[in-house]
Amino acid sequence: MGLEAQRAAGVEGQAPWATIIGCADSRKPPELIFGGLGLGELFVARNAGNLVDTATLGTVEYGSVVLGVPLIVVLGHTSCGAVAAACDVVTKNATYPGAIGPMIEPILPAAIATQGEAGNYTNNAAMESARRTAARLTASSTLLADLVAAGKLKIVPAIYTLDTGEVSYL
């Protein structure tokens, strides 16, 4: 179906099959990562580090409660700049100007937890951050927790590998 037909089909409403909480990184647009999907198939919330603040949580709740989206994917990625910044805070006591420092604060526990693990520190922290963000969704939202408990919603963390284009569910 062409773009014009997809637009016309979506005028009356939307029924996405998944909500993606993804990083704002320009190298990982969810609509292309998941097979060049058309309009109306994904409900997407993006910010640096694929984090969940109040606005993102409300967006995700809207997708699940109002639109009935049955799947939430917290999609981290390799070579994430926000995660690398958090790792630098942990290992180098780095500081960042403006709102960047407070923005990456939720990533710090993942960076601390994975420090010293075998493999790539930033990528390990990105995976751990995605896991922790996925777990926080039900801890932060009784709406989402109730849907999960009722078997109407699944929440999964995942990592997108930039150099291969593969998504691995964690």
Image: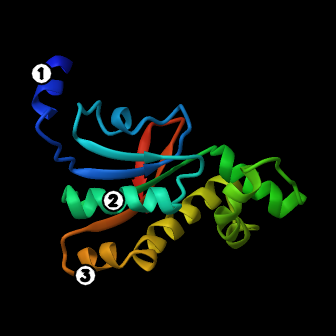
Q: Is residue 123 above or below residue 12?
A: below
- Disc marking residue 5: 1
- Disc marking residue 72: 2
Badge 1: residue crowd in 10 Å (few <14, some 14–19, many ≥20)? few
| Comparing labels 2 and 1, the label whose residue is closer to the camera | 1
Question: Could you tell me if the residues under marks 3 and 1 are in contact, i.e. CB atoms within 8 Å?
Answer: no
N-terminal-most mark, 2 or 3:
2
Where disc 2 sits, the SS reads strand
Camera-side residue: 137 or 99? 99
| Comparing labels 3 and 1, the label whose residue is closer to the camera | 1
Q: Residue sitting at 37 percent across and 50 percent down? A: 20
Q: Callout 1, which amino acid?
A: Ala
Residue at mark 2 to residue at mark 1: CA–CA distance: 27 Å
Q: What residue sits right under mark 3 in the picture?
A: 149
Rendering colour mode: rainbow
Q: Residue sitting at 74 percent across and 67 percent down? A: 115
Residue at mark 3 to residue at mark 1: CA–CA distance: 37 Å
Badge 2: residue crowd in 10 Å (few <14, some 14–19, many ≥20)? many
Horizontal and vertical percent position of residue 141? 39, 75
In the image: residue 32, left or right of residue 8: right
Q: Callout 3, which amino acid?
A: Ala
Horizontal and vertical percent position of residue 84? 72, 50
N-terminal-most mark, 3 or 1:
1
Q: Callout 2, which amino acid?
A: Ile
